[in-house]
Image: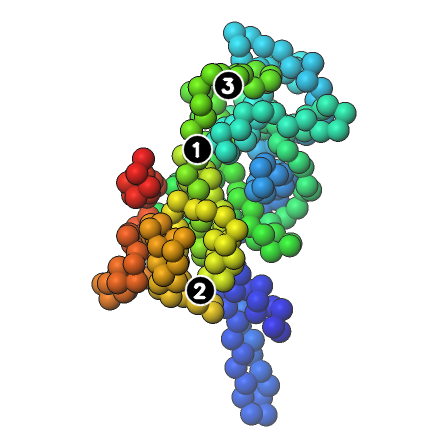
Amino acid sequence: MDVVKSALEKLGGDIAVETRKNQGATTRLQVPFSLGILRCVLAVVGDTVYAFPISSLDGTIRLAMDQIQTDRGKPLISYRQEMIPIHYLGELLGIDGNSEWPTQEGGHLLVLVLSHSQQRMAVVVDKILREDEVVTRAFPFPLAGAVKFVSGSTLLRAGEVGLILNIFEIFEETRKKHVKAPGPAQKTGARKKKKVRVLVVDDSITSRIVERNILEPAGYEVDLAENAFQALEKVEAQNYDIFLVDIEMPGMDGFELTKRLKAEPKTKRTPVVIVSTRSAEEDKRRGIEAGAQGYIIKSKLEPSTFLQMIKHLVGE
């Protein structure tokens, strides 16, 4: 029963057992209405697992680099007697600004062919895991639509979060975006700007992934910690430019973590922003008194305002 309870809690549900003398017991499993079952192909880009709905997939292929052709600088491949565009998904998602296409052993690419409204498009991924039925969960407002190309999340076998891709948005983006053909990275004489390093501390897997997927396309380098103790270990080993901290975490809450960070010579001048579901004025006051420079309520998180606050606090 503990295993069932743990799995339900991860999905946002609950379990209740009612017992009546001489009548037996009733077990109720409660699952959110926002959940659904979707058959997907799971693939990895960067260090994130993405789920591609089977209904939007036309096929998977291994492709040699020399099979890619170009038309006016745009990469194309021949697929079922048709020339279709091909893109690296990591580049479309803006992951770490990486535009180098990942080749496998032997020099080939792993490609998923997507279909939408009688159109096809190929996307290159780092790794294809498997086809699986996943339990999907839509993001709550206002996170719905906040993460580019993502419509929801799913909890995978090993406990990690996978992101459900919005295939329609990917097609819309590629119509507007010019993507260069794959090739060696161009060298320039310009000095590369140092990335701002952010530590997100939150016991919610979904919140960590959502914040990371807002920050990384904006050019930030993001590390994740699932509790305050893990955060303090990371701080010992690494320097950060800003901390994004949840309040409700096991062991040590966000208020106490903020106080600890402000008491340490290494981090006392590093800005802290509390990102929490709590909206009471008392919680905001406690956060500021603990040393936080900002306070964001998760239900009101708006990506542009979120990024603007971070830019202001890190001096960009």
The residue carrying mark 1 is 194
Visible residue check, residue 49 = yes
Determine whether 42 is above or below 265 in the image. above
- In depth, the one of 125 and 4 nearer the eye is 125
Q: Secondary structure at mark 3?
A: loop
Identify the mark at residue 179; answer none if there is no mark.
Answer: 3
Visible residue check, residue 52 = no
Identified at 66% across, 46% down, the residue is 132
Q: Identify the image quadrant of the N terminus.
A: bottom right
Q: Identify the image quadrant of the C terminus.
A: top left
> What amino acid type should be assigned to the residue bearing mark 2?
Met
Q: Earlier in the sequence, mark 1 or mark 3?
A: 3
Q: Nearer the viewer, mark 2 or mark 3?
A: 2
Q: Nearer the viewer, mark 1 or mark 2?
A: 1
Determine whether 175 is above or below 245 in the image. above
Which residue reaches farthest bottom? 22
Q: Position of residue 162 (x, y in %)?
A: 56, 46
Q: Secondary structure at mark 1?
A: loop
Q: Secondary structure at mark 2?
A: loop
Identified at 30% across, 38% down, the residue is 315
Q: Position of residue 32 (x, y in %)?
A: 47, 59
Q: Nearer the viewer, mark 1 or mark 3?
A: 1
104 horizontally vs 185: left or right: right
| CA–CA distance in space, label 1 to label 2 | 31 Å
Determine whether 177 is above or below 160 in the image. above
Identified at 53% across, 71% down, the residue is 15
Q: Local crowd at mark 2 within 10 Å, few (<14), some, or many (≥20)?
A: some
The residue carrying mark 2 is 249
